[in-house]
Amino acid sequence: MPRVRIGKHEFSRLMAGGNPVSGNSHQPGRLSREMRDYFTAENVKKMLRACEQAGINTWQSRADRHIMRLLNEYRLEGGQIQWVAQTASELADIPRNIRECAGLGAAGVYHHGSSTDSLWAAGRIQEVRERLKVMRDAGVLVGLGTHIPAVIDHAEEKAWDVDFYMTCIYNLSRTKEEASRVAGRPVEGEFFWEPDRVEMLKRVKQTRKPCLIFKVYGAGRRCGSAEDMRAALRQVFEYAKPSDCLVVGMFPKHKEQVRENCALVREAL
């Protein structure tokens, strides 16, 4: 798997995402529960070993107690995978959470995108910038996550001190009313709107900062066939810079997704 350098770290162009391990499928129905049931500690470690064997050297996942314990156990058993940590927005003390990530050897930490977007909507985006300063002081790569293209525009205009952006190519932060207006119909639950992809990918291309691009397959909505997956990847790589990476969640219960995704990304590159 090709790699890129961000700061002092080398990252594989394809990273493993953490949502499936946390039982977050972004799908209606029972899939989230199925993920939670499948990802025992042993199966998480099995997947991480498969990633390292296939050339994926980085895992992006949330910095909650469960994930940090799993990661520590994996490393005690000899695992070497790098960690890009997402702040755990349910915790009361985010600066402490950031310092804990640094203490566990995170290569980078990024501010949780949904939390960023909530503070943006509330007119409190400066609070995010203060948390990014804590990351810088902790000695990790500094990342800003968001689902909203305008947040990237703001950070660029104000020259925020970030090393990378964590960019979702679907805007999942619309209110129910906003989503229904855009869709032209009542919307329940999360709204995956295909035109959103290009809007965020334009920001990925415009910024000189590396981007970790996620929801490439629309949380499974672009996985109906291998050709659909190839088309999704081709679109992303039309905009992605040589310094950008893709983050893809993998759920290898029913098929071998790690090597499949590695092959598709290498083909697209």
Image: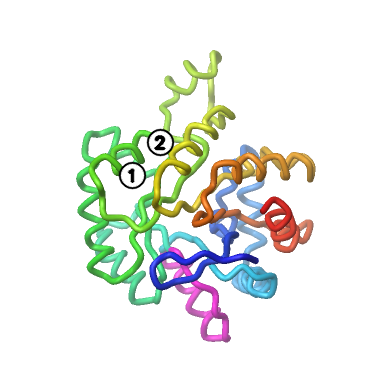
Q: Residue furthest top?
A: 184
Q: Earlier in the sequence, mark 2 or mark 1?
A: 1
Q: Front-most of 48 and 210?
A: 210
In the rendered image, residue 116, in percent from the top left (x then y), is placed at 33, 44
Secondary structure type for disc 1: helix
The reply to whether residue 87 is in sight is: no
Residue 160 horizontal/vertical position (percent): 26, 50
Q: Quadrant of the C terminus?
A: bottom right
Q: Are marks 2 and 1 in contact (CB under 8 Å)?
A: yes
* Residue pictured at 67% horizontal, 61% vertical: 38
Q: Residue at x 45, y 59 (%)?
A: 62
Residue beneath the point at 54% across and 79% down: 80
| 2 or 1: mark nearer the eye | 2
Q: Which residue is mark 1?
A: 116
Q: Which residues are magenta?
A: 64-84
Q: Quadrant of residue 195?
A: top right
Quadrant in the rendering for residue 257 = bottom right
Report x, y in % for residue 113.
40, 46
| Rendered residue at 29%/33% (across/down) | 121
Q: Amino acid at mark 2?
A: Ile
Q: Which residue is mark 2?
A: 148
